[in-house]
Image (cartoon, rainbow, N blue to C red):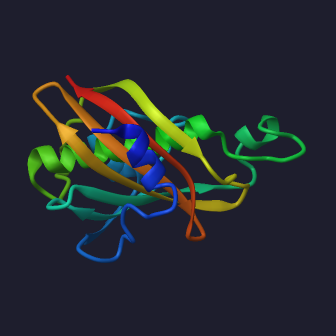
């Protein structure tokens, strides 16, 4: 699989419009915490809004309030949400998708044990547009491949229908 070609292709093309073929859902922070190990201040997903098990796609969002401390230092004269945190957010969305695909479900039981996962590689990323204070980042992730040990995901950060960043990463489910 040519990761650089995928990054180039999806710089201008949405992975999903998050409206067709997705099963609509409304999972917030409490639900997300049941399936991934991340916690504040490093939990970078606020909401999961749609899942497509057949096409292996998930959609959600992250609000970037103007008072988020990250904007104070990145950068004082032109605040922008850091690209590394954008990559982490779509990675966390991929980990959520990993849970749904592994369990072949779109539901989260009330007593779900979080997955043990580890990011192993960032295979590439492009940062195209700044995410400014007050933005609502739409997060889309799609599984590219999986084997017995590793899974590879591609993800996009979209604000106001503009693709702000795209990345491909690999995880290992422990």
Give the farthest residue toward the right.
77
Give the farthest residue toward the bottom.
20
> Where residue 19 appears, x then y in whole percent?
34, 76
> Which residue appears at 36% of the width and 66% of the height?
16
Is there any visible trace of residue 148 in the rendered image? Answer: yes
Q: Against 38, is 89 above or below?
A: below
In this view, the residue in front, 92 or 123, is 123
In this view, the residue in front, 146 or 28, is 146
Q: Give the side of residue 23 with respect to residue 4, left or right.
A: left
| Quarter of the rendering containing residue 162 | bottom right
> Which residue appears at 30% of the width and 46% of the height?
96
Is there any visible trace of residue 43 in the rendered image? Answer: no
> Where residue 98 appears, x then y in whole percent?
23, 43
- The quarter of the image holding the N terminus is top left
> Which residue appears at 16% of the width and 59% of the height?
53
How many numbered circles are shown? Answer: 0
> Where residue 80 appears, x then y in whole percent?
73, 47
> Where residue 27 appears, x then y in whole percent?
34, 60
Q: Against 155, is 52 above or below?
A: below
| Quarter of the rendering containing residue 39 | top left
- The quarter of the image holding the C terminus is top left
In this view, the residue in front, 127 or 137, is 127
> Which residue appears at 80% of the width and 34% of the height?
73
Q: Give the side of residue 123 with respect to residue 117, left or right.
A: right
Q: Against 56, is 121 above or below?
A: above
In this view, the residue in front, 110 or 124, is 124
């Amino acid at each position: 699989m040519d990761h650089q070609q995928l990054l180039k292709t999806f710089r201008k093309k949405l992975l999903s419009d998050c409206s067709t073929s997705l099963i609509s859902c409304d999972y917030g922070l409490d639900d997300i915490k049941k399936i991934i190990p991340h916690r504040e201040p490093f939990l970078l997903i606020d909401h999961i809004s749609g899942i497509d098990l057949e096409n292996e796609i998930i959609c959600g969002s992250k609000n970037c309030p103007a008072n988020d401390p990250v904007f104070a230092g990145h950068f004082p004269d032109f605040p922008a949400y850091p690209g590394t945190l954008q990559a982490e957010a779509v990675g966390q969305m991929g980990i959520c998708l990993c849970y749904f695909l592994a369990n072949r479900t779109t539901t989260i039981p009330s007593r779900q044990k979080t997955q043990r996962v580890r990011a192993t590689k960032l295979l590439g990323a492009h940062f195209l547009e700044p995410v400014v204070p007050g933005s609502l980042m739409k997060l889309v992730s799609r599984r590219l491949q999986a084997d017995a040990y590793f899974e590879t995901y591609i993800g996009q950060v979209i604000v106001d229908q503009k693709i702000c960043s795209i990345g491909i990463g690999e995880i290992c489910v422990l």
